[in-house]
Image (cartoon, rainbow, N blue to C red):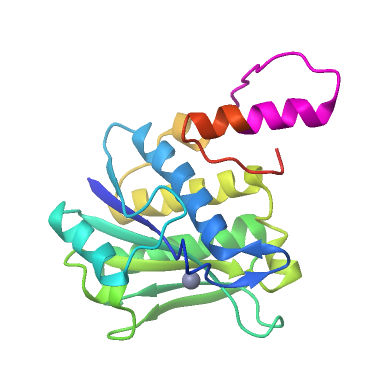
Amino acid sequence: MKVCIDPGHGGSDPGAVGNGLRECDLTLNVALKLRDILLSDDRFQVVMTRTSDVFVDLSERARIANRENCDFFVSIHFNAFNGKAYGTEVLDYNGTGIGRVVGQTFVDILEAEEGLYDRGVKATHSTFAVIRETKCPAIITESCFIDSASDIQHFDTSEEREKLARYHYRAICAGFGMEPKQEATKPKICYYVTGGFGEGSKASQEFETFMRSKGWYYDKKY
Ligand SMILES: [Zn+2]
């Protein structure tokens, strides 16, 4: 199965901003984690619409998936409204088929594992170019509201977003009638030793330089 992962927003378009977080950073972080999980399962191939903080036009995102003949398209977003709205929802272009199963599984998992309010899977026939113009089944996940303090506390650290990436993986497996692989659902911790430093701030600077030199995502919380 070839899955196109689309981290919402990026570059000149930060998306929603709330509680000191930018949607474009969270979506990229979850997307890169989901990519690594899917690639650790040999039944999947992955296509990314972006892997860094750059602007990609919505139609271009759909074209990437179409050109690569992807079997499924998942666009990762976080919701925002007035600071009072909360919960998880999935937008599904058709409201039927694989997208519906992935979406329903996803909201069920977030309700069961995180206690997030289930806003349901919504069929959206025309409004969103990114899922309208893709030929394969396509969904947008809105895991929670970035501008709701009680919602976003579930995913405001890199470790929590690792869990969120795994929820996406489990839901995608369900859509294709596959069992998730156990090893792919367990977090992996890697240690990188960059040197010994007298000051903590020097160590974190050195770590950031190292991560960026590898082109890896750097989350300041670590
Ligand atoms: Zn968004």
- Residue nearest the observer in this picture, 167 or 222: 222
Q: Residue at x 68, y 49 (%)?
A: 157
Q: Residue at x 21, y 68 (%)?
A: 134
Q: Residue at x 56, y 64 (%)?
A: 23
Q: Residue at x 28, y 63 (%)?
A: 61
Q: Residue 151's x, y, as percent? A: 69, 67
Membership of 201 in magenta stretch? yes
Residue furthest top as drawn: 196
Q: Toward which corner of the image does residue 144 lie, by quadrant? A: bottom right
- Residue nearest the observer in this picture, 17 or 42: 17
Residue furthest right as drawn: 198
Q: Quadrant of the C terminus?
A: top right
- Residue nearest the observer in this picture, 197 or 128: 197
Q: Residue 80's x, y, as percent? A: 59, 77
Q: Residue 53's x, y, as percent? A: 47, 54
Membership of 63 in magenta stretch? no
Q: Quadrant of the N terminus?
A: top left
In the depicted structure, whether residue 82 falls above or below residue 113 = below
From this viewpoint, is residue 157 visible? yes
Q: Which residues are magenta?
A: 189-208
Q: Toward which corner of the image does residue 22 lie, by quadrant? A: bottom right
Left or right: 11 in relation to 117: left
From this viewpoint, is residue 188 visible? no
Q: Toward which corner of the image does residue 8 lie, by quadrant? A: bottom left
Left or right: 65 in relation to 110: left
Left or right: 208 in relation to 40: right
